[in-house]
Image (spheres, rainbow, N blue to C red):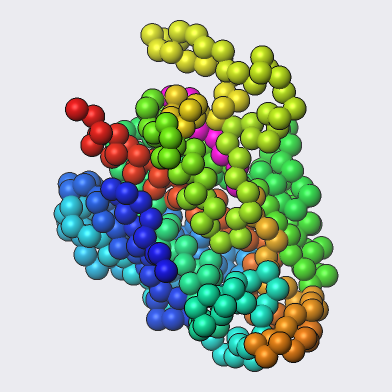
Amino acid sequence: MSNTFGNIFKITTFGESHGAGVGVVIDGCPAGLEISREDIQKELDRRKPGQNTLTSQRKEKDQVEILSGIFENKTLGTPIALLVHNEDAQPVSYEEIKDTYRPGHADYVYDMKYGFRDWRGGGRASARETIGRVAGGAVAKVLLRNIDVEVNAYLVQVGKIKRLKDWKIEDFEREYIKEIEEARRDGDSVGGIVEVVAKNVPVGLGEPVFHKLSADLAHALMTIPATKGVEIGDGFACVEKRGSENNDEMEMRDGKVRTKTNHAGGIVGGISNGEDIILRVAFKPTSSIVKVQKTVDKNGQELDIQVHGRHDPCVALRAPVIVGAMVALVLVDHYLLSKVNKV
């Protein structure tokens, strides 16, 4: 089972949803990077559960503990180990259905692949694993800030509610809250779309064949639990355009080659072109729902299941910080690779 991501700037996440704790080991971070515990904690605070009535009511403080690799607010160039203890794990909630395969979850395929699985909330398949990604992404974001690269991610759709251009964030929130609450009253859930924009990305990140920046970003984002689709720039909408409409014409602006539009989303031929990198990620509706569903157990017996517990009715609500973290990790890795590959 692979738990490591990256080429030069590598992260290895560890821990299970209802185990003792979760975290990450970061290898390949340059020495001398100024970073504080608060830089990491503020990112973890954005993803922690229980922040409002629309997210899981699991009560976790998610306070990060720096075990190694950072001294006096500077990286040492050695592996950075970050740990978050699980303080509100309740594995007993899953004991009743430990031999039953939950629809939409990885229970069945884990059993078939490994012959054994952690039934306590999904184990490694749980979104709680993403704490390590967010912590690693926090370090990557600090490194990116040193080269003026900024990564921001935000919701653009929840269920059938799309954020309109003239809507304020309050208008969007009011409408999607209604969508989520209606689904929850029915014992159901909804999905969502997160958009991420990376600004000031240098020209030349990525390679033209098997390590295209676009391919590595898509790979990274598709590893996030509940992700079902990724598009870059205009994505699938470009199918309806002609080449003359989809091509980004070029011009000189402030002494630099720029494009008049950005249908490509900042990546051409797998290489960054200096424009904003724009991606969107689709998240499926939360698989754990109270609504009665048909399933089978380990013995092949067909039965009904209701999944009770503390689950987000829309996983996309807490996904932006995870999406931003994975994009930051890829950009840092490619930035460092670009330095190595230059003569």
Q: Position of residue 143 (x, y in %)?
A: 30, 43
Q: Position of residue 30 (x, y in %)?
A: 21, 47
Q: Report the number of discs.
A: 0
For residue 63, say whether it is visible.
no
Front-lying residue, 313 or 202: 202
On the rendered structure, is 272 left or right of 55?
Answer: left
User: Where 134 falls versus 194 (above or below)?
Assistant: below
On the rendered structure, is 9 left or right of 184?
Answer: left
Residue 307 magenta-highlighted: no
Q: Position of residue 223 (x, y in %)?
A: 51, 56
Q: Residue at x 66, y 80 (%)?
A: 101
Q: Residue at x 45, y 71 (%)?
A: 61
Front-lying residue, 315 or 240: 240
Corner quadrant of residue 284: bottom right
Front-lying residue, 300 or 125: 300
Q: Position of residue 42 (x, y in %)?
A: 41, 56
User: Where 146 falls versus 104 (above or below)?
Assistant: above
User: Where 235 falls versus 57 (above or below)?
Assistant: above
Q: Main SS type for the magenta part?
A: strand
On the rendered structure, is 282 left or right of 182?
Answer: left
Front-lying residue, 196 or 304: 304
Corner quadrant of residue 66: bottom left
For residue 95, say whether it is visible.
yes
Q: Residue at x 43, y 57 (%)?
A: 134
Q: Quadrant location of the N terminus?
A: bottom left
Q: Quadrant location of the C terminus?
A: top left
Give the magenta part as a residue range: 274-281
User: Where 115 falls versus 30 (above or below)?
Assistant: below
